[in-house]
Image (tube, rainbow, N blue to C red):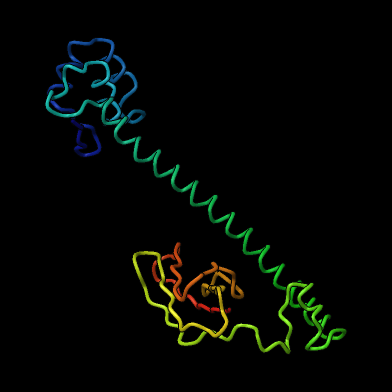
Amino acid sequence: MSARLSHGRAVLPESIKTSLKTDPLQLHWVTSHGLGHHTADQIVRDQMTAHPALEVATLATHQQAVVVHGAPSSAVSTLNAAWSEQRDKKDARDVAATALQDRLRKLYRELQQFLGDNDPRWLEFGFNVPADDSIPGVPEDLAVTPAVTGHLLARWSAAPRAVRYHVFKQVQGVDQDFVFALTANDTTADMNTFTSGAHVKVRVTS
């Protein structure tokens, strides 16, 4: 139930007019304060709260409507807060991963000045021996296709001597470089949490 405005004045429903006539206090408030400081809709809501019998029994009461209207709003606020927290954690992770990648690149370039390509001490630093031909081959025939909403499915051909694969991704406009996505034990990888319309580059190493 609501009031309508006519030529700048609130026109109340007949049930509210009756209530105002039978309730001197409400009538005094309206006539002394005017509708300029209190909207017609607010008067209707106040009347429904004070006189719930005026509401149609088959419809939701004003109090029920407030509860029903507030529940989705609260849920949306909670969801937005969770998404914000997730984005902050992802940003922190990406910053840490980028810093680690930069340090590893610098370490590799420095080691090249002191270690030969066949020096086994490369393994002590977590790198493959450059001259060791027993290292896994390079994965080929990489193909990436959309899957369910937010997911990308990557497939590639098996690389010689490879027992696992490292999958990296780069979301255009988000990631400055490739970031680690997951480790796969076969030749497929299901990556998720992508937003609709995102442009993603994928790289696979063995």
Does residue 116 appear anywhere in the picture? yes
Placement of 192 over or under 33, stated as above or below: below
Q: Quadrant of residue 115?
A: bottom right
Q: Position of residue 29 (x, y in %)?
A: 31, 17
From the top left corner, tell me how far across and down residue 204 is, in percent. 54, 78
Q: Residue at x 31, y 30 (%)?
A: 66
> On the rendered structure, is 99 left or right of 195?
right
Q: Position of residue 122 (x, y in %)?
A: 78, 78
Answer whether residue 168 is visible to the viewer in this image. no
Closer-to-camera residue (202/196): 202
Please give the name of the residue rendered at 39% of the width and 41% of the height, measured from the top-left corner. Answer: 75
Q: Nearer the viewer, residue 62 or 11?
A: 62
Locate the C terminus and report the quarter of the image it occupies: bottom right
Q: Quadrant of the N terminus?
A: top left
Vertical position of residue 170 compared to residue 66: above or below:
below
Residue 9 place in picture, x, y as percent: 24, 34
Count every numbered label the image shows and give the total. Answer: 0
Place residue 62 in its image quadrant.
Answer: top left
Q: Is residue 101 above or below residue 25?
A: below
Q: Is residue 154 left or right of residue 56?
A: right
Q: Which residue: 60% across, 60% down?
A: 91
Identify the residue at horizontal 59%, vertical 70% (top origin). 179
Q: Quadrant of residue 67?
A: top left
Q: Nearer the viewer, residue 135 or 146?
A: 135
